[in-house]
Image (cartoon, rainbow, N blue to C red):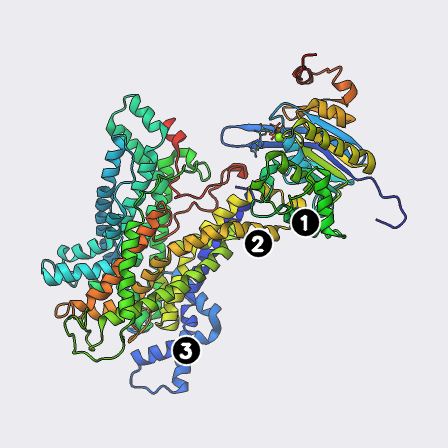
């Protein structure tokens, strides 16, 4: 990469990070009129909301001095370790948040253990098949799909089955080791499934390389070969694994909420709901630090795995992925078909009328029963699909446009893409709610704000590749300007591929929206949104399990569809974040542009030569 | 250009050009301390073994590759800045070494030939200009609507040539412009270039492995090896009395047909 590209990437990283910090710091100002009411309600319940009182509170907070002063106050406080006082309780926010962080870190540590066990289970068959000389991508999409349920859904299902029906473990609280088991499973299994699939794909790819065969013929032991293959596969995916770990912070919010674990995520959610902005600022900043530490650790691990040859751009790009199985379409077709049937059946019924008995049990006339207000669950699930999927479609389109525009800026997109990749939709949702209150539009904005990044990264990689093609390189000589080349030639050439990628992300985006709805950060009752339906039903799960069965089924089908579609694509477009090489992963001199594949950067010379 | 004054002859000069490629383990000095002048009305040949840096020199002259040292002068002024680049690009065209891949697979031949006419704002009936340019290179009918994959290698090469010529450049840089053509076509293309040179004073830099072609077309030639000019002179002498071993090797390798 040219010196200019490096500089651009560095500047854009710094700028993106600064933008996020400024955003957090100016939250009190961004949240508009509401702070004075929040404080009035919480602290001076006896006083009237007269203009004088409101103005006095605004003055106390310094809000009338504009966003810059608000930010400066906050930033100077943070530098001296003062994160302000809670608007609700009036006490300093930092001690409570640190305590909550401790709980969250414990939970995430337990979840990471679960995740690594799960990942090992998924990789073992692939490793074994490879050592036996039959490299295969291993476990089918169905097995992977089960492990890739969104955390909030898995948490709800575990709560219902293990804690409520089987009564094996306590459902709520945080008072001993047994309280951590279910949350750790709910948080760790999806991440573990994802890590397992990433590593398994990389391992299978490494086994197809020639040096493995050479080593086997040369008589190296199976254990040594296995270690070398793992070492080599890990170096390619460690960055993505780090993103999965960072993504745990988002999942932790949902899991802590479901199991009433007093961690950072739950504190954040509470702060967003009560508009306690100082608490929110401290929490989000701590999460950002956590993400930065994870990212830094991943970079260090990657460096030590690769040795000195591992500088960006020196990794050859992987060859063609193992061809998908002939029946790859089976799982998406079945789950998509079932989902469609559910939706069509529900669409023909009335979702709002309370015409049935309260929690009436299922019957032929009422296949999925009625909810707590006597409304038809099947109808609500069907209509909810229109809400959830329609919104998801709009979000996908917006992400496509934003991703294309930002991706076309090439190296300048590095910083925003990295920062956005590290931000889970739930955290974005909390920020949006803090600013403007919960709404469907707010949820859409939050998910859009973090979901364009993989598309931008893909676009940037394709721009680098296409710009290096001879017919594009010869255009300046014909008098075609840079801007015209980008818009007239490069953009049309990459549009089909990026659009396809965006469509593959549609179900994942729908799930993110449902997660926000479930946490009360999205559409409000009586909207029949899937996440909201699940949240409404979960209180009655003991007496009327059908209230969660309908929405849970729809969500499970959607996640199976999402995961199987993404693995049909060679594992290229996995759920949480960009799996594509960063835009700066470009070999010297730009002669051989990076081909966009699943990013499992491979490095046979480095390993084989050692 | 002031009215009435005799227009100055277009010139493209490389002064002391060097370009080194560095990658992990290798350092390749592709072009080292090369002085070269391509002038309107003159024709210059460039020969040299494969990998000696000929194409790199061409990219330097075109400004698509930056030199590490030295500079490129167009009409005596350094080739930097937007306006200067634009003027130079209109006056200097080139035929790339791999013409098929220099055509956009998504666009028709006609579109690609009109593009430079439009971008340089050239007046006149573009359709007939395009047709004339294609006819010049022997592509008579039925090529306007085709795309790159519907062309043979030699046809693509001639489309690339027509695209370079359609704007009536003053200087043409041709990298292996006849290498993919059969003998009759090769001769037709050489005749065309010779005619453009003789009639319109088109300046030529003609890179080829084909010494016979260079001999037919060029008054002078440079011999290139390992990024340096190792010998230079009128083609009539250079190929009959080669002094440098590289030149001797190239000349000796010309296949002789049995009498
Ligand atoms: N972008 C690049 N990066 C690294 N090395 C390069 C690059 N371009 C060219 N080279 C090297 O520079 C040298 C000169 O290459 P160049 O293409 O100029 O040769 P050439 O004389 O045109 O050869 P040919 O007759 O085969 O076309 C070669 O050794 C080549 O490997
Ligand atoms: Mg060449």
Q: CA distance from mark 1 to mark 3?
A: 59 Å
Query: Which quadrant of the frame does ligand 1 lie within?
Result: top right
Disc 3, SS: loop
Q: Which residue is mark 2?
A: A487
Where in the figure is residue A282, as x and y percent of width and height?
A: 34, 63
Q: Is residue A458 visible?
A: yes
The foreground one among A504 and A541 is: A504
Where in the figure is residue A423, as x and y percent of width and height?
A: 37, 57
* Label at residue A33: 3
Q: CA distance from mark 3 to mark 2?
A: 42 Å
* Label at residue B114: 1
Q: Closer to the N terminus: mark 3 or mark 2? A: 3
Chain of the residue displaying label 2 = A
Q: At 59% across and 39% down in the image, what residue appears?
A: B151
Q: CA distance from mark 1 to mark 2?
A: 18 Å
Q: Is residue B230 visible?
A: no
Q: At 38% across and 76% down in the image, what residue appears?
A: A35
């Amino acid at each position: 990469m040219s010196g200019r590209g490096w500089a651009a990437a560095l500047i854009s990283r710094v700028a993106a990070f600064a933008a996020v910090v400024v955003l957090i710091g100016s939250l009190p100002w961004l949240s508009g009129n509401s702070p004075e009411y929040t404080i009035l309600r919480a602290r001076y319940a006896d006083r009237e909301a007269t203009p004088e009182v409101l103005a006095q509170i605004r003055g106390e907070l310094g809000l009338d001095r504009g966003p810059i002063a608000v930010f400066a106050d906050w930033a100077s406080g943070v530098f001296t370790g003062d994160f302000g006082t809670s608007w609700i309780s009036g006490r300093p926010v930092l001690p409570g948040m640190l305590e909550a962080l401790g709980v969250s870190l414990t939970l995430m540590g337990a979840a990471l253990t679960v995740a690594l066990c799960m990942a090992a289970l998924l990789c073992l068959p692939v490793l074994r098949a490879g050592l036996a000389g039959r490299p295969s991508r291993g476990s089918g999409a169905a097995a992977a799909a089960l492990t890739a349920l969104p955390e909030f859904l898995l948490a709800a299902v575990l709560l219902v089955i293990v804690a409520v029906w089987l009564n094996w473990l306590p459902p709520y609280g945080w008072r001993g080791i047994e309280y951590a088991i279910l949350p750790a499973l709910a948080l760790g299994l999806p991440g573990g499934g994802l890590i397992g699939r990433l590593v398994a794909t990389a391992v299978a790819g490494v086994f197809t390389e020639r040096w493995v065969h050479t080593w086997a013929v040369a008589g190296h032991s199976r254990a040594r070969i296995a270690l070398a293959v793992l070492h080599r596969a890990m170096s390619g995916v460690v960055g993505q694994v780090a993103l999965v770990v960072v993504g745990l912070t988002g999942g932790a919010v949902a899991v802590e909420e479901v199991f009433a674990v007093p961690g950072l995520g739950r504190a954040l959610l509470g702060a967003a709901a009560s508009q306690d902005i100082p608490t929110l600022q401290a929490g989000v900043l701590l999460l950002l630090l956590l993400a930065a530490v994870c990212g830094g650790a991943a970079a260090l691990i990657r460096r030590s795995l690769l040795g000195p040859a591992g500088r960006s751009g020196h990794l050859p790009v992987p060859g063609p992925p193992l061809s998908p199985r002939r029946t790859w379409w089976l799982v998406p077709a079945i789950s998509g078909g079932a989902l469609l049937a559910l939706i069509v059946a529900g669409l023909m019924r009335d979702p709002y009328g309370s015409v049935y008995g309260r929690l009436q049990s299922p019957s032929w006339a009422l296949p999925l029963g009625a909810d707590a207000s006597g409304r038809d669950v099947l109808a609500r699930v069907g209509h909810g699909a229109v809400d959830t999927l329609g919104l998801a479609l709009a979000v996908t389109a917006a992400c496509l446009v934003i991703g294309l525009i930002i991706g076309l800026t090439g190296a300048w997109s590095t910083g925003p893409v990295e920062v956005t990749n590290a931000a889970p939709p739930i955290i974005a949702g909390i920020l949006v709610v803090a600013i403007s209150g919960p709404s469907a539009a707010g949820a859409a904005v939050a998910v859009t704000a973090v979901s364009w990044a993989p598309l931008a990264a893909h676009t940037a990689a394709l721009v680098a590749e296409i710009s290096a093609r001879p017919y594009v390189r010869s255009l300046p000589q014909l008098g075609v300007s840079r801007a015209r080349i980008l818009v007239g030639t490069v953009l049309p050439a990459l549009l089909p591929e990026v659009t396809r990628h965006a469509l593959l992300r549609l179900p994942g985006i729908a799930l993110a929206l449902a997660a926000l709805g479930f946490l009360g950060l999205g559409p409000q009752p009586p909207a029949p949104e899937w996440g909201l339906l699940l949240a409404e039903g979960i209180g009655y799960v003991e007496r009327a399990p059908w209230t969660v069965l309908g929405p849970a089924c729809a969500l499970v089908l959607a996640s199976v569809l999402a995961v199987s579609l993404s693995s049909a694509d060679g594992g290229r477009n996995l759920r949480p974040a960009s799996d594509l090489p960063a835009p700066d992963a470009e070999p010297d001199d730009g002669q051989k542009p990076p081909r966009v594949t699943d990013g499992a950067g491979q490095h046979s010379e480095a390993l084989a030569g050692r | 250009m002031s009215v009435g004054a005799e227009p100055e002859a277009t010139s493209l000069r490389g002064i002391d050009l060097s370009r080194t490629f560095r990658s992990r383990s290798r350092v390749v000095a592709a072009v080292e301390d090369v002085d070269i002048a391509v002038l309107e009305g003159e024709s210059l040949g460039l020969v040299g073994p494969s990998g000696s840096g000929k194409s790199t020199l061409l990219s330097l002259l075109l400004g698509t590759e930056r030199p590490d040292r030295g500079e490129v002068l167009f009409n005596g002024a350094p080739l930097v800045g937007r306006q200067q680049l634009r003027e130079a690009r209109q006056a200097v065209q080139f035929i790339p070494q791999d013409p098929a891949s220099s055509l956009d697979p998504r666009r028709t031949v006609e579109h690609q030939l009109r593009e430079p006419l439009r971008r340089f704002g050239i007046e006149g009936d573009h359709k007939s200009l395009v047709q004339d340019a294609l006819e010049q290179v022997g592509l008579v009918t039925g090529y306007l609507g085709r795309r790159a994959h519907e062309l043979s290698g030699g046809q693509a090469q001639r489309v690339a040539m027509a695209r370079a010529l359609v704007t009536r450049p003053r200087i043409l840089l041709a990298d292996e412009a006849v290498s993919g053509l059969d003998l009759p076509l090769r001769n037709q293309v050489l005749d065309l270039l010779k005619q453009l040179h003789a009639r319109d004073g088109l300046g030529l830099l003609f890179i080829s492995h084909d010494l016979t072609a260079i001999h037919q077309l060029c008054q002078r030639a440079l011999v290139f090896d390992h990024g340096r000019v190792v010998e230079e002179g009128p083609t009539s002498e250079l190929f009959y009395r080669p002094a440098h071993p590289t030149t001797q090797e190239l000349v000796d390798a010309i296949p002789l047909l049995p009498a």
